[in-house]
Image: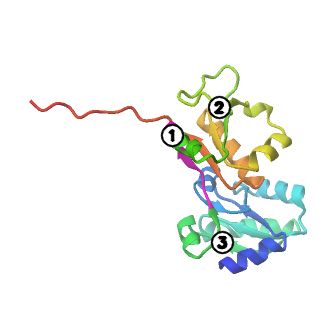
Amino acid sequence: MSADDYRKLRAEETLVADLRFPLDYLQGHLEGAMSVPGTRYHLRYQLAELGPDRPLVLIAQAPVDIDPLIKEAEAAGAQVTGVLTGAPRGWQARGLPVLAWAPMTVADLAAWRETGAALAVVDVSEAAEPELSGFPEAERMPLSTWTRETVETLQSGPTLLLGVAARVRYAAVRLYEAGAREVYFGQPAKPRTDPAPVH
């Protein structure tokens, strides 16, 4: 699939289902792709929710992973118009629009602030969990309280997510699926380790 092919499919409101594990999706996925971890049940459920009559592109880690899912999609009434396998690095080399989240330290955040560009800093931790030190300006928005409006608001601009890793990953997937283009995760600065003195 070329970049032009993908642009054409997206213009036709094609549903793009990324069947890889959510962590693989976060490390690199095509713009506009939904994370649908590759089980037949999830794919059937998503197609029922989003409309099985839409054209469909399936993305999988390897060709061997995708055949039963193509059959499942077609049995549910979907028209599979494309299949993509491989790794994001290869997709990027072909000009496909690849998005991925990246770490941001306190120093990175300070540098970002100096540019004057907007960035939402959101702590998705639950009330009893401690704050991630070094990011005092974060707005506490526990993931359990997120609504559709929360996602729509946050996906409209760059967002830095803080909190427990599993919750942050889930929040990032939700934002990307809603159309976010820039999602970062907070990474505390590593403590300085001076070399041991030589005697």
| Disc 3: which residue | 84
Percent from the top left, x then y, of residue 173?
70, 49
Marker count (numbered): 3
Q: Nearer the viewer, residue 39 or 96?
A: 96
Looking at the figure, which quarter contains the C terminus?
A: top left
| Disc 1: which residue | 105
Residue situated furthest left in the rendering: 199
* Amino acid marked by disc 3: Leu
Image-based side of 83 in relation to 28, left or right: right
Query: Which badge, 1 or 2, comes first in the chain's sequence?
Result: 1
Image point (68%, 33%), residue name: 124
Q: Is residue 90 above or below residue 46?
A: below
Separation of marks 1 and 3 at Cα, in angstroms? 34 Å
Disc 2 element: loop
Instruction: Tell me, yes or no, whether the highlighted magenta stretch contains residue 100.
Output: yes
Disc 3 element: strand
Looking at the figure, which quarter contains the N terminus?
A: bottom right
Image point (67%, 19%), residue name: 128
* Mark whose residue sits in front, 3 or 2: 2
Query: Which badge, 3 or 2, comes first in the chain's sequence?
Result: 3
| Disc 2: which residue | 138
Disc 1 element: loop
Contact? badges 1 and 3 (CB < 8 Å) = no
Q: Is residue 172 above or below residue 14?
A: above
Q: Which residues are magenta?
A: 99-107
Image-based side of 191 in relation to 76, left or right: left
Q: Which mark is residue 191?
A: none
